[in-house]
Amino acid sequence: MSSPRPPARPAPPTALLAHRRVHSGHGHLWWQRAWALFLRAPLVWGLMGLILMAAGLIISTVPLVGAVALALGGPVVIGGWLLSLQRLEQGEPPGIQGLFICFEAPWVRPLLSLGLFNLAVMLGLELALHVLGAGAALSMLVGLLAGGSGSVAGLMAGLGGALLALALMLLAATVLSMALWFAPALVALQGVPPRQALQASVAAALANTPAMLVYGLLGALAMLLATLALGLGWLLLLPLTLISMYTSWQDVYGG
């Protein structure tokens, strides 16, 4: 088994962060190319996906610590998966060890920085939702106690607070997904510093919103079908989703 190779010397920053603007139909191509890569080593990718799902389920059962570990370690695991895909295209067969490659230098620290960003946003969002939720509940309670027109005003204020909390959650989730979509590949495969990678990922996602929407709609349909198949479809969908992160990076950044 060959030892992990460090990434090539990074290109100049302007070359690293330059992205392409692709047609909306490329959102479909990302899934199509992911399927083609999956078929080159289906047993390995399937087994890696099974291990990842099982580990995630086990870790998530640990109160508090499990959620923190998943938030921090997610980008590190994804980075290893992406490196395995790059090496597959360079002629090196993938293996289960690909899940753990990036837990070593030089990848672990910058990828953990992405995990810290992920954790910080999630904690900030949860805190904001609690505050807004408590405010909405208090407004409704005060309105009900006041009675009459005050009751209606309180209910409307509470509903407004709930809608604001929902809008905040959707906005934060969208920004987080855009920031973390291309960032692991930029860090693990191109050596981009974490903060630049997050900024570049958001910029690339915004520039390719039509393709991202097509990709997301197809992904939502796939999630529905995977869930309807007694959840077993996720054994295929999880590897395909991670591979599609690689194919989308290839397309947008010319990797």
Image (cartoon, rainbow, N blue to C red):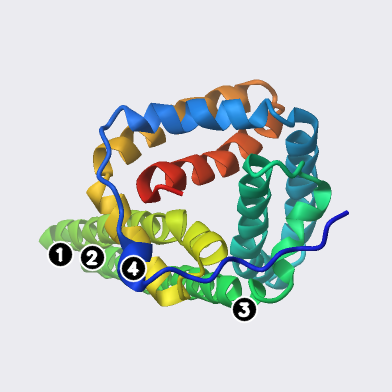
Name the quarter where the N terminus is drawn: bottom right
Residue 167 in view of the camera: no
Tell me the residue that label 1 is attached to. Answer: 150
Q: Residue at x 57, y 63 (%)?
A: 188
Per the rendering, the mark at residue 143 is: 2
First along the sequence among labels 3 and 4: 3
- Given contact means CB atoms under 8 Å apart, are the residues at marks 3 and 2 in contact? no
Q: Residues within 10 Å of mark 4 (few under 14, many from 20)?
A: some
First along the sequence among labels 2 and 4: 2
Tell me the residue that label 3 is attached to. Answer: 109
Q: CA distance from mark 4 to mark 1?
A: 46 Å
Q: Residue 243, position in %: x, y?
A: 58, 40
Per the rendering, the mark at residue 199 is: 4
Q: Residues within 10 Å of mark 2 (few under 14, many from 20)?
A: many
Q: Is residue 65 above or below residue 34?
A: below
First along the sequence among labels 3 and 1: 3
Q: Secondary structure at mark 1?
A: helix
Mark closer to the observer (3, 2): 3
Q: Amino acid at mark 2?
A: Gly
Q: Secondary structure at mark 3?
A: helix
In this view, the residue in front, 83 or 198, is 83
Q: Amino acid at mark 3?
A: Arg
Q: Residue at x 51, y 66 (%)?
A: 187
Q: Residue at x 73, y 37 (%)?
A: 45
